[in-house]
């Protein structure tokens, strides 16, 4: 089978690795990712240019396309490719609104009485924001309605001092049309531990994957700005040290009800559904959905997949998705980023990745926003590569992963604390306190 993977990052590299033994791979990427380039017939072009993607897919006569990132989904790449007779793993433009339009997502919860929602309001007028915040006695989260790569979200008690700073930031979001619209979602701030559940969906059947916890803050100790994610871990039993089976099942039930509701509103959701949850005292509540794999979270789950990924993709497209089995192993992923990230001033620096030694240490490399020029690899303004290890315990996987990071050289940084005993204990203590234990 010929499969086109659209996207440039480590998430797409992990998707390609999961398909490569069974499929002839094609790819469209905006930089030359060395990991994807060596296992696919590729074209360097904007993955958001639907005409280019469609032309390439037709020219190569692909049977199926797997859409990695959200921005082509927002533009309607699936509608475009399906119109040309190419099946897709990824939701169509309307179904992708679960990620691309936060007011659609929250309204869906309300109208279909899906559990796990929160207090929210959508605004397009500053006076209404000001009146709402004057009366609201809890801390809030400010989100642009459209896509900002996770970087437009600001939280009172974290990046914003109080609800009065929240007002100023909301005005800035509206004035600058951040995320593409002069609209803002204001949500109550949830207190708890965040976790991710990703699932395959054929529009009816939802097949969940092991839970993962990402680390969005740029610096160690959960300090600094929110990024696309600095690293993540998962546990052998598919749960997390602070997350019970019952709580995981509640999250999956919320996702199952969500695809049922999307089906009723706009038709079947076919692709990957990413649920980001906050585990609160009363159980999981939905922070947001993504219409794609998480990055880095794809790198935790895909290397453990035992079921054929090509069969899973076919099941998604045909609407007869069955179970997916994963190796029972813990994983740790650490993202290596340019020094100074998320500032962009340190781009275009050479990096040196000793893949042979990394592989001998038992870890894997997934390349992200780097650019290969002849035999050299250069950073861009975003995350450079993920190093991933799996083992019997999170602690063992963390040690393998940390050791492997030594074999990547350049003006680079990574969070050494991802997956360590200390940070996991901190998460567990936090959750115990919230539960009143
Ligand atoms: N890990 C966050 C995201 O994929 O959006």
Image (cartoon, helix red, strand yellow):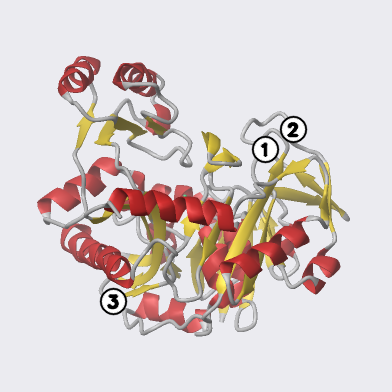
Residue 164 rendering spot, x and y as whole percentages? 31, 16
**In the image, what residue occupies the spot 42% across and 52% down?**
429
Q: Nearer the viewer, mark 3 or mark 2?
A: 2
Name the foreground residue: 297 vs 175: 297
Residue 243 rendering spot, x and y as whole percentages? 37, 63
Q: Where does label 3 land, which residue?
A: 205
Determine whether the residue tagged by mark 3 lies in a helix, strand or loop: loop
The image quadrant of residue 381 is: top right
Name the foreground residue: 170 vs 76: 170
Q: Where does label 1 land, which residue?
A: 381
Residue 36, visible in the rendered structure: no
**In the image, what residue occupies the spot 36% across and 84% down?**
322
Residue 216 rendering spot, x and y as whole percentages? 51, 45
First in sequence: mark 3 vs mark 2 = 3
Find residue 346 and name its label.
Answer: 2
Rounded to the nearest whole Å, what is the CA distance between mark 3 and mark 1?
38 Å
Q: Quadrant of the C terminus?
A: bottom left
Locate residue 183 relative to residue 389 in the image: left or right.
left
Rounded to the nearest whole Å, what is the CA distance between mark 2 and mark 1?
7 Å
The answer to whether the residues at label 2 and label 1 have Cβ atoms under 8 Å apart is yes
Locate residue 143 relative to residue 63 in the image: left or right.
left
Determine whether the residue tagged by mark 1 lies in a helix, strand or loop: loop
Badge 3 density bin: few <14, some 14–19, many ≥20, Cα 10 Å = many
Asked if residue 289 is positioned above or below residue 257 in the image, the reply reads above
């Amino acid at each position: 089978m010929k499969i086109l993977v659209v996207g440039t990052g480590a998430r797409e590299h992990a998707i390609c690795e999961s398909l490569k033994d069974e499929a002839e791979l094609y790819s469209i990427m905006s930089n030359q990712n060395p990991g994807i380039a060596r296992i696919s017939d590729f074209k360097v072009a904007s993955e958001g240019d639907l005409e280019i993607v469609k032309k390439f897919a037709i020219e190569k006569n692909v049977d199926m396309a797997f859409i990695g990132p959200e921005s082509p989904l927002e533009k309607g790449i699936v509608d475009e490719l399906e119109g040309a007779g190419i099946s897709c793993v990824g939701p169509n433009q309307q179904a992708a609104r679960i990620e691309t339009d936060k007011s659609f997502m929250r309204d869906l919860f309300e109208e279909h009485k899906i559990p796990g929602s929160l207090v929210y309001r959508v605004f397009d007028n500053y006076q209404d924001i000001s009146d709402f915040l004057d009366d609201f006695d809890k801390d809030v989260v400010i989100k642009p309605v459209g896509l900002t790569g996770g970087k437009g979200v600001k939280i009172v008690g974290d990046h914003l001092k109080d609800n009065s700073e929240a007002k100023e930031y909301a005005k800035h979001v509206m004035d600058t049309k951040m995320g593409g619209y002069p609209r803002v979602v204001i949500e109550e701030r949830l207190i708890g531990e965040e976790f991710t559940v990703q699932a395959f969906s054929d529009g009816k059947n939802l097949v969940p994957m092991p839970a993962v916890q990402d680390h969005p803050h740029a610096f160690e100790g959960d300090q600094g700005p929110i990024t696309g994610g600095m690293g993540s871990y998962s546990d052998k039993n598919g749960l997390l040290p602070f997350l019970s089976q019952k709580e995981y099942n509640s999250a999956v039930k919320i996702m199952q009800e969500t695809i049922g509701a999307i089906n009723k509103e706009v038709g079947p959701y076919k692709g990957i559904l990413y649920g980001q949850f906050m585990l609160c005292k009363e159980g999981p509540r939905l922070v947001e959905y993504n219409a794609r794999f998480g990055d880095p979270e794809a790198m935790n789950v895909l290397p453990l997949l035992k079921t054929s990924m090509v069969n899973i993709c076919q099941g998604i497209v045909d609407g007869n998705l069955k179970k997916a089995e994963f190796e029972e192993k813990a994983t740790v992923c650490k993202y290596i980023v340019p020094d100074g990230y998320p500032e962009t001033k340190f781009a275009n620096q050479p990096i040196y990745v000793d893949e042979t030694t990394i592989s001998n240490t038992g870890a894997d490399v997934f390349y992200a926003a780097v650019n290969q020029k002849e035999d050299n690899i250069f950073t861009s303004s975003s995350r450079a590569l993920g190093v991933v290890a799996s083992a019997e315990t999170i602690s063992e996987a963390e040690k393998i992963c940390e050791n492997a990071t030594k074999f990547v050289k350049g003006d680079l940084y990574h969070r050494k604390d991802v997956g360590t005993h200390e940070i996991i204990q901190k998460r567990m203590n936090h959750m115990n306190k919230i539960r009143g234990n």
